[in-house]
Image: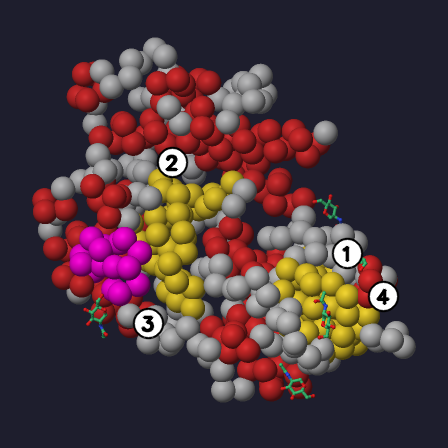
Amino acid sequence: MAYAVIFSLLSILGACYAHNITEILSSDPSLSEFNSYLTQTKLDDEINSRQTITVLALDNGAMSTLTSGKPLSVVKNILSLHVLLDYYDPKKLHSIANGTVLTTTLYQTTGSASAQEGQVNITDLKAGSVGFGSGQSGSKLNSTYLKSVKQIPYNISVLEISAPIIAPALLTAAGSDVNLTAVLDKAGCKTFASLISSSGVLKIFQNQMEKGITIFAPTDEAFKAKGVPDLSKLSNAEVVSLLQFHALSSYSPVGTLKTTKGKLATLAPGGGKYDLSPTTSGDTVTLHTGVDSSRVAGTLLDSTPVVVYSVDNVLLPVALFGESPAPAPSPESDSPSPAPSPEADTPSPASTPASSPASAESPAGESPAEGPGTDADESSSKNGVAERKSSTLFIAVVLSVASGVISLVL
Ligand SMILES: *[C@@H]1O[C@H](CO)[C@@H](O)[C@H](O)[C@H]1NC(C)=O
Ligand SMILES: *[C@@H]1O[C@H](CO)[C@@H](O)[C@H](O)[C@H]1NC(C)=O
Ligand SMILES: *[C@@H]1O[C@H](CO)[C@@H](O)[C@H](O)[C@H]1NC(C)=O
Ligand SMILES: *[C@@H]1O[C@H](CO)[C@@H](O)[C@H](O)[C@H]1NC(C)=O
Ligand SMILES: *[C@@H]1O[C@H](CO)[C@@H](O)[C@H](O)[C@H]1NC(C)=O
Ligand SMILES: *[C@@H]1O[C@H](CO)[C@@H](O)[C@H](O)[C@H]1NC(C)=O
């Protein structure tokens, strides 16, 4: 039931600023290469999930110079510099205060940019022409404004410019032969790194890296947390499935995770029993397994078509660790839930609009009827505990989404 509420609320929210860059660009065949590369690099999802944005498009000729001989990860970096996190229509371009401005781009948000590398210089040149260049001081304004492609006022503006904007630092490849275990070791995911090596799953991941892969690596703390099953009690095949459950067979950078609706199939074979359901609240993506859930904590590597995240918890698949208490697809069946009190609290989110996720994080606060950490709790299954935790989390999400809706309406 909680799932159903969240998904319907999220879809209402999602519909509020729905633009589709792929569709906008498809009206102009001379921009088809640019459009295709936005899709390949998944920048389309990132653009669609943002508001107040300007996309500087390049025609097919400019794109062929830009892409020739460059790996996709480099092309993505350069194209990220063509997405401005502000709204510029043709009128605003010609009325920039003092005639020149530095504006922040999507590349800045990747975290790998220095302040100037991630910015674009827009300068009103004389005679009605507007120039664009890298924000790095001393850069030439090699690109000029050509024409407007589309404006949806203050949400998205698409402008065509004459040539790519290039910051020299963006041309260096992140390395196509990434050493996955080294990346994981360095980021405090040594346990996961050693498990994938010893189980042979590393080979499976490496084979997938050319075609595209997304890896969710639990931190070393995650493996030490209470409630994590004793891996030595699992068969080798089960360990392999558990590890494969931590990866997707496609490239899903953050913008893509945020815009995903429904379930994600993982590399673990076995159909729906190894699916992940992502939900988004603000900038935080949470993965739900049906048994437990985990925040996507950070991006360790994003080098198209490979993305590696760290996650706070080991993801436990239903196939190995039992059924979810409240599966999304059958809200009608209303099976008796072993954790009734958090459920019972949900109908009145409006009466407690101030509830923050932080206050809801303590299960004890939500269910006074059940004492915190009593022996009764201990004797109930691990699933019961996990379930209560996730129900509480859901309530937190529902409350924050609900207050979002309320504030939007007001
Ligand atoms: C722009 O976004 C706002 C806020 O999400 C939305 O209400 C509005 O309808 C959008 N404007 C257009 C023209 O789509
Ligand atoms: C955007 O439009 C394209 C082409 O019109 C379509 O294939 C795609 O599914 C749309 N994406 C979304 C998120 O609606
Ligand atoms: C424009 O230039 C003046 C004087 O150099 C400066 O004080 C002001 O901050 C500038 N405005 C902007 C928006 O950069
Ligand atoms: C933009 O670039 C031009 C030419 O290099 C330079 O004169 C101008 O100061 C730059 N604008 C800003 C805001 O840095
Ligand atoms: C800008 O143009 C000049 C010559 O017009 C060229 O030498 C330079 O490499 C170009 N810079 C970039 C970043 O494209
Ligand atoms: C990858 O890095 C690990 C150290 O984390 C090292 O032991 C291993 O030899 C490296 N593999 C390759 C192929 O360089």
Q: Which mark is residue 178?
A: 3
Which mark lies nearer to you, 1 or 4?
4
Disc 4, SS? loop
| Dots 1, 4 in contact, CB < 8 A | no
Which mark lies nearer to you, 3 or 2?
3
Whether residue 192 sits left or right of residue 266 in the image: it is: left
In the figure, residue 189 lies in which quadrant?
bottom left
- Give the image location of residue 378, x and y in percent: 19, 22
Residue density around tag 2, few if under 14, some if 14–19, many if 20 or more, within 10 Å: some
The residue pinned by badge 1 equals 152
Q: Residue at x 55, y 19 (%)?
A: 352
Q: Amino acid at mark 4?
A: His
Gap between marks 3 and 1, in whole Å?
40 Å
State the residue in front, 125 or 280.
125
Q: Which mark is residue 94?
A: 4
Tell me the quarter of the image containing the N terminus: top left
